[in-house]
Every structure is written in structure tokens, then in C-alpha cells.
Image: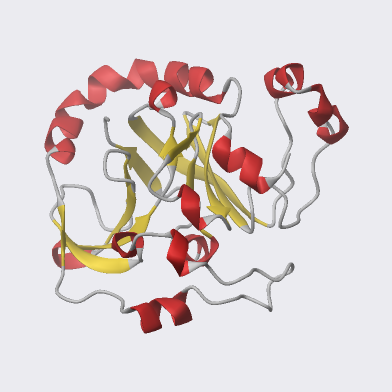
Amino acid sequence: MTAKQFDELALNGTGRLSRRSFLAGSAATVGAFGLAGGLAGCQTDGGMTRAEAALAYGPLPDEQFAVPAVDLDRIDRKFYRRTVRYETNEAPGTIVIDPNEYYVYFVEEDGYATRYGANVPKPEFLWDGTAYVGRKAEWPVWTPTRDQIGRDPELKKYAGGMPPSLENPLGARVLYLYQDGRYTLCTIYATIFPHTIGQGVSSGCVGLLTQDMLHLYARAPVDTNVVILPA
């Protein structure tokens, strides 16, 4: 399976497991989500120009696998990375995922956040709750689940893991989301396909442009709290 296929096809079984793993905690967090769900990330004046975006989303030749520049003609400029006003009760250093608006926020001090454009799960696989970064990896191995292999027998060749590459669905960086010590099968991952940003494409995972994912990855250590807002 290529990275493009991962972005455009649901991960079989991921959404169901994620829903179950977070369902038990949903009732306990309703109050918190009632507050968070109504909060908005208001734009600061300015934002990246096209020329600035060309630099921010340029090629990454020094990576283990050279990452191409983002085709800016295939992404709305509202999804460019930027600092925004973001009033929230979440502590600085928290990652907030807003599937309604296709944004991921990294909460900062004094009512600000860094905002990234994202792709999110397909409507039938949307879920909400709280998680944390249980582990993280650069150029990770991707291993399809049994359900995925059952749906697409060609994936059996990757049962032992797909080596890192530009074709690897998880891309250059990945944050693995956990709850109560268990991997939820959901991630925040890197994509080289700008046309997926602002779309629902997976069955539980969230993707950022590789250049944005490197930016977030450097700021989000293991144990970073993650809040997924209701859709």
C-alpha cells in the first residue's frame, strides 16, 4: 500500500477499535469537551504569503528519504501553518485535534497556538476523547493489521512490516496515540499529499503535511496530552 492509498482509503478496523478504547472515557470528559468544543482558533493578522509558504513547505533533501516540496496549488492557503489566537482551558503543550475544521493545534502560552492544516478520519470513523503520545518515531515501519490484510490480501507481503520510504503510509514522522497504556491504532502521521489536507480520508488517523509534522514532532514529547474534539 502506498502513502497515497493510506491517505485515500480507510484503515480497516482502526476506527472500531479506537471508538471502543475511548468510549469508556467519553462520559467522564463530556464536561471538558463542552468547554473545548465551543472554542475557536481565531486568525492573527497576516499569515504566510505564497512566497513564505514556498519556503516553509519547500523540499527536505537532508531527510533519510528526500521529501519533495509541497505543491501549493493543491492546498488552500487557510491550511498553511500559522500562529493564531486560541482560547482554551487545555494546558500549554497540549495537542488539540478539531475534525470539524480540519485543524490540529499545539497549545502555547498566553492564549495562542500553532495551527496546522490536517486530514482527518472519514465521517463514519470520527471519534473523540483524550489520549496521549505513547511513543514516536522517525521514518517508522508500517505494519498492516489482520483486518487490513483480510480486505486486501496484497498487503500480506507487509505482514512483517513495510520498511521506511516515501511510499510508507506513515511517512517521515509519526506520533502514536495511547490510552491507559494501550496503543489505540490511531496516529498523527506525515503525508506528502497536499490534496488530502482538509479532507476526511482515514479510519481514525490524522495526517499533517510532512513539513508541518516535523515542526509538531519536534515540540511534542512522549506523554504529550492529545484532545480530540467531537465532530
| Left or right for 99, reference 180 | left
**Where is residue 79 shown, x and y percent of the image?**
34, 59
In-front residue for pair 115/191 = 191
Locate the N terminus and report the quarter of the image it occupies: top right
**What residue is drawn where x is 56% and y is 38%?**
8
In the rendered image, residue 74, in percent from the top left (x then y), is placed at 46, 60
Which residue shows up at 22% across the image and 48% down it? 90
Q: Quarter holding the C terminus?
A: top left
**Colouring style:** secondary structure
Which residue occupies the foreground of this view, 55 or 143?
A: 55
Above or below residue 36? Residue 175 is: below
Residue 117 visible from this viewpoint: yes
> Please, is residue 176 above or below residue 179 in the view?
below
Count of numbered tags: 0
Q: Is residue 95 left or right of residue 12?
A: left
- The residue positioned farthest toward the right in the image shown: 157
Q: State whether residue 215 appears in this view.
A: no
Q: Nearer the viewer, residue 170 or 57?
A: 57
* Residue 85 image position (x, y, % from top left): 15, 63
Residue 84 image-quadrant placement: bottom left
The image position of residue 47, as x and y in percent, is 25, 74
Residue appearing at x 72%, y 42% in the figure? 142
